[in-house]
Image (spheres, grey):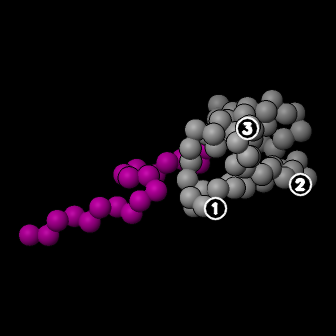
């Protein structure tokens, strides 16, 4: 018997909304979820009707990464 789906995908106006469905483990990733996400992403990347965000990274425009530690506040300097 195969594992139940760990993601739910709903498409509205050519935008896929992907919902993780593993509440018992707070949506922690496992091999099955990763395989399902990979399969969805590969299919979305080939879909001509999908929005730009579903295309491979080389065609999507990424925001510039700020210097320092991306996604984190700067480290405060040590005071003497």
In the rendered structure, which disc, 3 or 1, sits on the residue that comes first in sequence? 3
Q: Which residues are magenta?
A: 60-80
Q: Position of residue 15 (x, y in %)?
A: 83, 50
Image position of 75 (left or right of 29): left
**How far apart are the two marked residues, 1 and 2, measured between alpha carbons?**
24 Å
Residue of label 3: 2
Q: Is disc 3 in contact with disc 2, using a CB cutoff of under 8 Å?
A: no
Q: Quadrant of residue 55?
A: top right
46 inside magenta stretch: no
- The residues bearing labels 3 and 2 have C-alpha atoms spaced at a distance of 28 Å
Classify mark 1: helix, strand or loop: helix
Q: Quadrant of the C terminus?
A: bottom left
Residue corresponding to mark 2: 12
To which quarter of the image does residue 37 belong?
Answer: top right
What residue sits 64% from the left and 56% below the top?
A: 22
In the rendered structure, the answer to whether residue 47 lies left or right of residue 64 reads right
68 w.r.t. 26: above or below: above
Q: Is residue 5 above or below residue 24?
A: above
Mark found first going from the N terminus, 3 or 2 = 3
Q: Badge 1 is on which residue?
A: 23
Where is residue 25? Give x, y as percent: 56, 58
Is residue 55 in view from this perspective?
no
Is residue 78 within the magenta segment?
A: yes
Furthest toward the bottom, the residue is 79
**Disc number lying in front (1 or 2):** 1
Say few, some or many: other residues with alpha carbon within 10 Å of mark 3 (under 14 / 14 to 19 / 20 or more): few
Determine the residue positioned at 87% across, 50% down. 11
């Amino acid at each position: 018997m195969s594992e139940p789906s760990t993601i739910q995908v709903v498409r509205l106006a050519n935008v896929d909304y992907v919902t993780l469905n593993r509440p018992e483990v707070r949506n922690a990733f496992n091999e099955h979820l990763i395989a399902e996400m990979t399969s969805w992403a590969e299919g979305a990347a080939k879909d001509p009707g999908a929005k730009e965000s579903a295309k491979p990274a080389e065609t999507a425009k990424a925001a510039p990464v700020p210097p320092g530690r991306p996604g984190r506040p700067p480290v405060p300097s040590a005071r003497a």
